[in-house]
Amino acid sequence: MTDIKDTNIHFHQELEELERKVLSMVDRAEQMVEMAVQAVTNDDVDLARRVVELDGGIDATYMEVHQDWTTLMARNQPLGSDLRRMTILIQLNVTFERMGDQCVNIAKIAQLNHGLPRVERICEQIREMGDLVRPMIRTAIEAYVRGDVDEARLLPAMDQPVDRLNANMYKETVAVGSNPQLLEWATKMLMVSRALERIGDQAVDFGEQTAYLMTGERAEFDEDGMARPIDDHHNI
Amino acid sequence: MTNETSTENKIDNVIEERMTIEPDQTGEAVPAVAEAPGVIETKDMSVFYGDFRAVADVSLNFGRNQISALIGPSGCGKSTVLRSLNRMNDLVATARTEGEVHYHGQNIYAEGVDPVEVRRTIGMVFQKPNPFPKSIHDNIAWGAKVNGFKGSKTDMADLVQEALEAAALWDEVKDKLQESGYSLSGGQQQRLCIARAIATKPDVILMDEPCSALDPIATLRIEELMLELKENYSIIIVTHNMQQAARVSDKTAFFNVKLNDTGMRTGRLVEYSPTEQLFTSPNEKDTEDYITGRFG
């Protein structure tokens, strides 16, 4: 009983391949966040168009992962940590596809806002949110790859300034005054802020998935990254 | 005669025990999350074949009206454990059981307990369907008669129908009860064997890989049947098919083979958990390795 042999090698190789595919989406999503924020804050419509194009790649991978996942489940009916990993991969597939969609939303706003007057202070705040959200995606993916629950637990704290900046954006929008064009621009930037806030939440969710994979217990993180059982959460 | 009387008394005691073990016997409220009341409990049970210890120190509590599954690699002792639960191992000359097996609190290995009565109360369905070379009707009637059925012909007809209905076979065989049991398909034969076990009015049904000789559809029918039967019986099943254990059982016991100091391979209980937990987040690394196909 000393040498543990993997008698399920073929499945485990296919599972790794599926995982690589899913994680390739998050690399692309991280890049898209950077490009989308630049496009919307620098009024760069060419860059915005490239973001939309990149999302086509994410969507294609999403469909491919869905197909591969279904086939793997049907063929292997995995159990234990294999089952947990499979469950997480199908959920992450959706999460990353949505991240891509949020970036497309930002890019489309960049196109709609093209040529409108702007407030630099708001642009600065959006850039700051982008700079806070991208490291969250990086941290989430590194925690997953290393299976490091402690690292995943850092994510809620990283998300707090993003939430604060998003909440502050309402005040900034009201403060732009009554110029209709400026107001139109600022209202759309509020949607950009909301999209970035959602991406931050998705990174926290990614961290929770990692915690589930490693511990086998489903939980949502509280603000300090401590596990809060799902049932409790609904009572709060 | 004296012996027989004392055996009967013993059985009466067992039955008495069954009647009196109710959740409210202490007069206290049962906690909402209490374990299902046990029907069979093993305490530090070891089974030997001659000097060879096949399985060691098994302590398990099987729930009433539950399906409990025993899984593990070949040679882990799961079938040995199953056969010890109704003293079927007594039929193997070299077999010896240490420790205790309690049925509703009564040790079935205690002196004076009649193994035949134990096997009637705790029935067994085997891997390969083994109907008697008799008609469908007689397959059920014969077992009941051997076990002391003394009713009229009509009572017997009722019993046969009841048992076949309970085994989900009645509709398929009601017009050919006098045909041979062998004329049925493999899946039907296995349901006939389940009907035969039911006809002796058991409390617990042990199943030793009951679907391993059946095709997938016949397997699903037996699994559906098991889920229906657990309303009235407690079922303990040995299966090689982990998906089957996952589909039907409430709790699952995982056994593994361990080498001892002298190089002997002995089966041991590794983990006994609610089935959904055992197959998604098992407590033991050995279980995790086995269910994900990593096996030494």
Image (tube, rainbow, N blue to C red):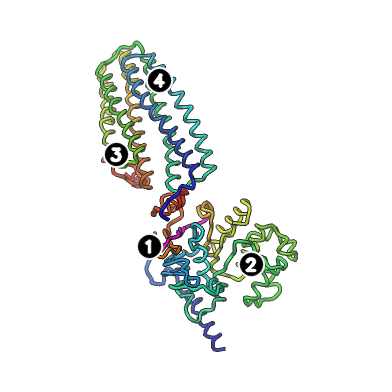
Mark on residue B196? 2
Q: In which quarter of the image is residue B142?
A: bottom right
Instruction: Judge whether residue B252 is colored magenta.
Output: yes
Mark 1: few/some/many CA within 10 Å (<14, 14-19, 20+): few
Q: Which of A226 and B267 is in front in this view?
A: B267
Identify which amino acid the numbered label 1 is placed on. Answer: Pro
Q: Is mark 4 on a helix, strand or loop?
A: helix
Is residue B104 visible to us here?
Answer: no
Q: In this picture, is B284 found above or below A160? A: below
Residue that numbered label 1 is attached to: B31
Residue that numbered label 3 is attached to: A151
Q: Mark 3 lies on which chain?
A: A
Mark 2: few/some/many CA within 10 Å (<14, 14-19, 20+): many
Labels 3 and 2 within one chain: no
- Depth check, mark 2 against mark 1: the one in front is 2
- Depth check, mark 1 against mark 3: the one in front is 3
Q: Alpha carbon of mark 4 to alpha carbon of mark 1: how far?
A: 58 Å
Q: Which of B64 and B187 is in front in this view?
A: B187
Q: Alpha carbon of mark 1 to alpha carbon of mark 3: how far?
A: 39 Å
Q: Is mark 2 on a helix, strand or loop?
A: helix
Residue that numbered label 4 is attached to: A51
